[in-house]
Image (cartoon, coloured by chain):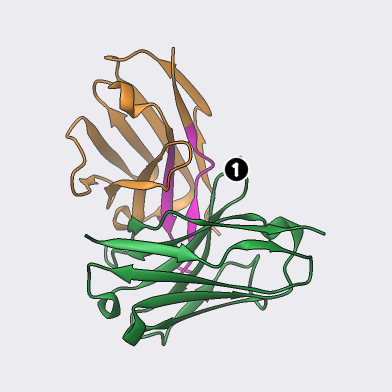
Chain colours: A orange, B green
């Protein structure tokens, strides 16, 4: 089973700053199978990025994804107040199972 | 509007059973693979189960294999999760989620239904 490790656990930044979130896999992951989600308190997760770098429908272009192999990154170029939330990466593996990272909490500094 | 609405959650004793439902609307349900994902209170997301569009292919997380059964009724635009032999560690919000297929990701989520396993 592929384990995804997200870092940092908590990221404290101010609106207008750039956020860089990391997701590292214990084995190589196909870029087609790496996704990022945003979750706000009391809400369901929302798909942000799929295929490592493709933005989902309606997602602002300040969100971007990159990476390959075992190292993937979600970047938010200029933080808006509504971007403060928990972010999860997700992968789909050869054993036909999905796994999520433990999450990164992006909080207002 | 594309929508998924879960129901069927509640309080159940350890060892008990519960059946969750997920009603789909606004899209051709029979064309999409579906999943269940859960989230324990204050914890992260955990994938539970997958079902193909026809229902012929099914996968489970090891933590629920042999206890949970996923199914679907395409005529009723509905997804189900039968949960048996429930344990305290199954306490969570359960979400149904639509699968994009290729590439793999969950693009539509329901609002979730809470399952509490406690005596």
Q: Position of residue A11 (x, y in %)?
A: 46, 22
Task: Say which residue label 1 marks.
Answer: B43
Along the viewing direction, whichever of A32 and B12 lies nearer the viewer: B12
Q: Position of residue B49 (x, y in %)?
A: 51, 69
Q: Residue at x 32, y 87 (%)?
A: B75
Q: Residue at x 65, y 65 (%)?
A: B63
- The question of residue A98 being in magenta is answered with yes
Along the viewing direction, whichever of A70 and A92 lies nearer the viewer: A92
Q: Is residue B94 left or right of residue B103?
A: right
Image quadrant where one finds the C terminus of chain A:
top left
Q: Position of residue A47 (x, y in %)?
A: 32, 48
Secondary structure, mark 1, is: loop
Subunit ID for the residue under disc 1: B
Query: Relative to B70, does residue A46 appear above or below in the rendering?
Result: above
Q: Position of residue A101 (x, y in %)?
A: 50, 45
Q: Is residue B113 left or right of residue B12?
A: left
- The question of residue A99 being in magenta is answered with yes
Image quadrant where one finds the N terminus of chain A:
bottom right
Write the start and end of the magenta stretch as one range: A87-104
Q: Residue at x 36, y 63 (%)?
A: B4
Q: Residue at x 63, y 74 (%)?
A: B65
Q: Is residue A67 left or right of residue B5?
A: left
Q: How many marks?
A: 1
Q: Quadrant of residue B24?
A: bottom left
Query: Relative to B65, does residue A38 appear above or below in the rendering?
Result: above
Along the viewing direction, whichever of A40 and A11 lies nearer the viewer: A40
Query: Relative to A97, does residue A34 appear above or below in the rendering?
Result: above
């Amino acid at each position: 089973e592929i384990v995804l490790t997200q870092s940092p656990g908590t990221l404290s930044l101010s609106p207008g700053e750039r956020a860089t979130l990391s997701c590292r896999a214990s084995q190589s992951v196909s870029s087609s199978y790496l996704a990022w989600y945003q979750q706000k308190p009391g809400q369901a997760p929302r798909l942000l990025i799929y295929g490592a770098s493709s933005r989902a429908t309606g997602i602002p272009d300040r969100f971007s994804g990159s990476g390959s192999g075992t190292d993937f990154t979600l970047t938010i170029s200029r933080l808006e107040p509504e971007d403060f939330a928990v972010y999860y990466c997700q992968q789909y593996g050869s054993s036909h199972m999905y796994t999520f990272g433990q999450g990164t909490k992006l909080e207002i500094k | 509007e594309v929508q998924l609405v879960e129901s069927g959650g509640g309080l159940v004793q350890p060892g008990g059973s519960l059946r969750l439902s997920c009603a789909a609307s606004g899209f051709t349900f029979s064309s999409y693979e579906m999943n269940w994902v859960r989230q324990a209170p204050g914890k992260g997301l955990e994938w539970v189960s997958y079902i193909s569009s026809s229902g012929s292919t099914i996968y489970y997380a090891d933590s629920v294999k042999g206890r949970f059964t996923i199914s679907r009724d395409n005529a009723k635009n509905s997804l189900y999760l039968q949960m048996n032999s429930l344990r305290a560690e199954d306490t969570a919000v359960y979400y149904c989620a639509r699968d994009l297929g290729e590439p793999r990701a969950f693009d539509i989520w329901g609002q979730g239904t809470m399952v509490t396993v406690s005596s």
